[in-house]
Image (cartoon, helix red, strand yellow):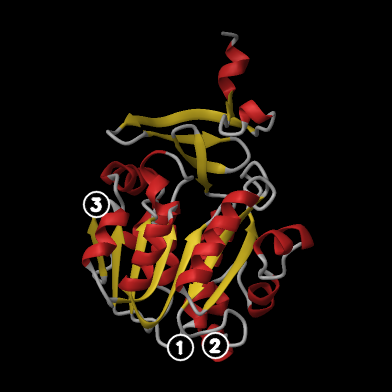
Amino acid sequence: MPVESLLWFEEKLEYELGRTIKIKINKLIEQYDSKFQRIEIYETKPFGRMLVLDGIIMCTEWDEFTYHEMITHVPMFTHPMPENILVIGGGDGGTIREVLKHPEVKKIDLCEIDEHVIRLSKQHLQTMSSSFEDNRVSIFNEDGAEFIKKRKNCYDIIIVDSSDPIGAAEELFKENFYSSLNDSLKNNGIAVTQSESFFYDDDLIKDLTGFAKKYFTYPAYFFTLVPTYPSGIIGFTFCSKAYHHTNDLNIDRISQIQPSLKYYNPDIHKASFALPNFIKNKTNL
């Protein structure tokens, strides 16, 4: 293989469909095969360090804030008093970092099935993983789908910061999981789940938002821009028992932490729920 070809990382998830993204790399920092997946951390030329699971880009230091701020602050600022939080997945620590910006938070459970994602993130992705050291954080290396079955009426917010719907994360995209989310939330709880791109995954999104409609009073779908994902965007399913995704936004609380945010603001929050016609028609949202 030519030396030059070794200097590029190419994501293969969409390769058979003719879609890919290539990123110039300086070096492979770490590669580890856990019992769940291959974990790789690269130093890239344009985007800083990059976490890759089974050949799929999870995050880069350059643009991770767009994803982590939106998956976190949309539900956190919709709920009036988010004290007890569960994060499923999220082994890089970025979502926990954002949750901890909210002074109301008393306890965070992180359920990450693969302990080695956390271990390697602590070693190499400190801008995100330093959040694990907070004494409000408890870490559980368990299957998230099974974890919530044992915890009924427990959480104000559940954030499902999962990888794509293959392998260990596949159960997190099924109806039974959404039913369990409903059971694990308190009576006024909110869940947000990573729900792929509406350009590439409209059928999946129709299913996920359908589950949200079945089990929650206020279902919705919103999205953010992530340049290092192949489609450039990623979306989330919003599942709320009691609070509307835009009408119940807590503007006063946002001002407390606004200076620490690089992407999220009240206008972005509201605009992120504005969907193109083709996905509105597909999901009937």
Pick whichever of labels 1 and 3 is earlier in the sequence.
1
Q: Using the numbered discs, state the Cα–Cα distance from disc 1 to disc 3 in whole angstroms.
A: 29 Å
Q: What label does residue 250 carry, if any?
A: 2
Residue at far bottom of view: 252
- What residue appears at the point 70 percent right and 72 percent down from the top-left corner? 271
Q: Amino acid at mark 2?
A: Asn
Q: In the rendering, at what x and y percent does residue 275 appear?
A: 72, 65
Q: What label does residue 142 carry, if any?
A: 3
Q: Secondary structure at mark 2?
A: loop
Q: Amino acid at mark 3?
A: Glu
Q: Secondary structure at mark 1?
A: loop
In the displayed structure image, the side of residue 195 where residue 162 appears, left or right: left
- Please say if the residues under marks 1 and 3 sit with CB atoms less than 8 Å apart: no
Q: Nearer the viewer, mark 3 or mark 2?
A: 3
Eyeballing the image, is 222 above or below 129?
Answer: below
Pick whichever of labels 2 and 1 is earlier in the sequence.
1
In the displayed structure image, the side of residue 50 where residue 167 appears, left or right: left
Pick whichever of labels 3 and 2 is earlier in the sequence.
3
Q: In the rendering, at what x and y percent does residue 92 appear?
A: 40, 51
**In which quadrant of the rendered image does the N terminus lie?**
top right
- What residue appears at the point 62 percent right and 82 percent down from the top-left corner? 246
User: Local crowd at mark 1 within 10 Å, few (<14), some, or many (≥20)?
Assistant: some
**In which quadrant of the rendered image does the C terminus lie?**
bottom right
- What residue appears at the point 31 percent right and 71 percent down from the top-left corner? 184
- Please say if the residues under marks 2 and 1 sit with CB atoms less than 8 Å apart: yes
Between 68 and 247, which is closer to the camera in this rendering? 247
Between 184 and 124, which is closer to the camera in this rendering? 184
Eyeballing the image, is 110 above or below 252?
Answer: above
Q: In the rendering, at what x and y percent does residue 279 appear?
A: 71, 59
Q: In the rendering, at what x and y percent does residue 164 appear?
A: 48, 45
